[in-house]
Amino acid sequence: MTETPGQPATALTEDEQKTVRSAALRAGALVAQAEPGFFDTFKESFAASRAVKAASPAVQKLVAGGLPEMPSGGKDEVRARTLDLLKQSVGILTEKTPELVEEYKQVVLQSAKDVAAAADDTSEKETGTIGEIERALAG
């Protein structure tokens, strides 16, 4: 198969798409859970979408549409699963759409940072969670 520049190498399967989308959305939720607050949740939800809206159409397509994998289990299980999804997503994109990997990582990380900054200052817990996300994205 001959690839044209700018065209993804291989389309993602439905399961791969769900993994990539779930990882991106759950990363922001993970930061929000680091410092929970009822009213903060609304600000954080809007903040999480800013980075996605600023992304290229190709990356927007990766994280939009369909339902993400819903978290289950306790806090530690949710954290571990979210970080695992991030690692899986980078692997999937590296294999199938390498031209989108770096932008995807930037969008996920910026979204997490925007969530942390949405409700006043970024706390130590939020900073720690962002560090975990960054390490998961780095592989």
Image (tube, grey):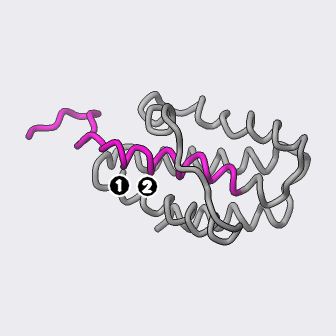
* Amino acid type, callout 2: Ser
Residue underneath mark 2:
89
Question: How far apart are the two marked residues, 2 and 1, measured between alpha carbons?
Answer: 5 Å
Relative placement, left or right, of 76 versus 120 is left
Secondary structure found at label 2: helix
The tag on residue 92 is 1
Classed neighbour count for the residue bearing mark 2: other residues with Cα under 10 Å, few (<14), some (14–19), many (≥20) = many
Q: Is residue 130 above or below residue 17?
A: below
Q: In the rendering, at what x and y percent does residue 88 appear? A: 42, 61
In the rendered image, residue 12 lying in the magenta stretch gets the answer yes
* Amino acid type, callout 1: Ile
Tell me the magenta residue range: 1-30
State the residue at coordinates (77%, 57%): 33
Callouts 2 and 1 close, C-beta under 8 Å: yes
State the residue at coordinates (87%, 45%): 119
The tag on residue 102 is none
Q: In the rendering, at what x and y percent does residue 138 appear? A: 50, 65
